[in-house]
Amino acid sequence: MADSDEESANLPRSTIQKFIKEVVPGVRVSNDAKDLISNICNEFVHVVSSESNSICSQKNKKTIFPEHVIEALKNLGFENYVGELKKVLGDLKTEKEERKKCSKKLEKSGFSLTELEQQQKELFEKAREQQAKEAEREWKQFIEEQNAARCTESSKSVS
Amino acid sequence: MAGKEQVQEQENQLSENTSSAIRLTKLPQTRVRNIIKLDRDVTLASSEAVYLITKTTELFVEYFAKEAHKRTVVYKRKTLQRKDLDEAVKGTDRFAFLEDIPLD
């Protein structure tokens, strides 16, 4: 459907409106102003991605990478955003590395998540059984010791 | 056809890592990615590139709305109107690329 195609390639107006409310709180925004801002957002994405793609092609790459975007922004006169963007990108990379570490551990085991869960269940079962056996053994020992103590006492009293 | 499949697979791999970034922007990255893909010259954009473009758009809109709002305040209005945005565009060189944006 043409309509849904168009919609999916536009930023949702409701989200943009919410965003504007956060940016200029307590200020009413007219409907045509909201519409214009929505269109501006879409246009901005086009302009930045187009410039990023030019830079990407110039460098003979097929995928647009962050460095292409950063250079595009400098070319478009938005170099003052570069500092903050580099920082958030750094934060994102750190988070990705943390996630990679966790998933590597999972991969190294050679088992799927379900298999690992099953193994964990079995380990817990074994541990419970062992604990139960240990408790039974200790109880038996305790009873024996008690009996032995009673025997000694009664033999003493007899003599 | 093999080329298209390869591209799709690469896209899937690239977007796997998106989940960590996906919550970090207010504007939806999937829509931004769709807008980027509309350009036929674009083959692929990494998830980090999409994230950066989304973040930049947020920064831009914030700046632009605040610039327009300054005009609202000067004219002692409580409602930000289209003419405030128009004036912000004219008054800032960097916004020149926005001059011919039509309303739908």
Image: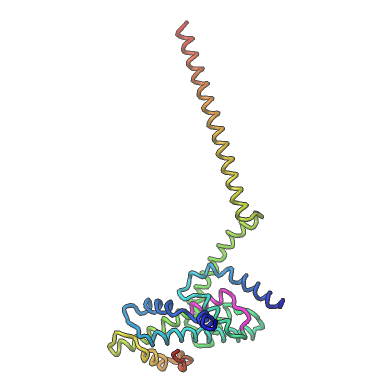
Question: In x, y percent, where is residue A122?
Answer: 60, 44
What colour scheme governs how the chains and residues are painted in the rendered image of this protein? rainbow
Of B52 and A122, the residue lying toward us: A122
Q: Indicate the position of residue A27 as horizontal and vertical percent values.
A: 32, 81
Identify which residue is drawn at 49% across, 13% down: A152
The vertical placement of B58 against A75, above or below, is above
Q: Which residues are magenta?
A: B42-56
Image quadrant where one finds the N terminus of chain B: bottom right
Name the quarter where the C terminus of chain B is drawn. Answer: bottom left
Most foreground residue, A29 or B88: A29
Residue at image point 37% right, 78% down: A21
In this view of the protein, which residue sits in the foreground, A40 or A100?
A: A40
Residue plotted at (59% across, 68% down): B16
| Residue A5 placement: quadrant | bottom right
Q: Which secondary structure type mostly characterizes the magenta part of the structure?
A: helix
Q: Position of residue B9 (x, y in %)?
A: 65, 72
| Residue at far left of view | B76
Magenta span contains residue B54: yes
- In the displayed orientation, state which residue is furthest to the right: B2
Queried whether the magenta region covers residue A143, the answer comes back as: no
Q: What is the tally of numbered marks visible in this picture?
A: 0
Judged from this view, the residue extending furthest toward the front is A1
Q: Which residue is at 60% across, 49% downward?
A: A118
Viewer-closest of A117 and B57 = A117
Image-based side of A147 in relation to A57, left or right = left
A28 with respect to A50 (left or right): left
Residue A29's x, y, as percent?
A: 35, 83
**From the viewer's perspective, is residue A130 above or below residue B71?**
above
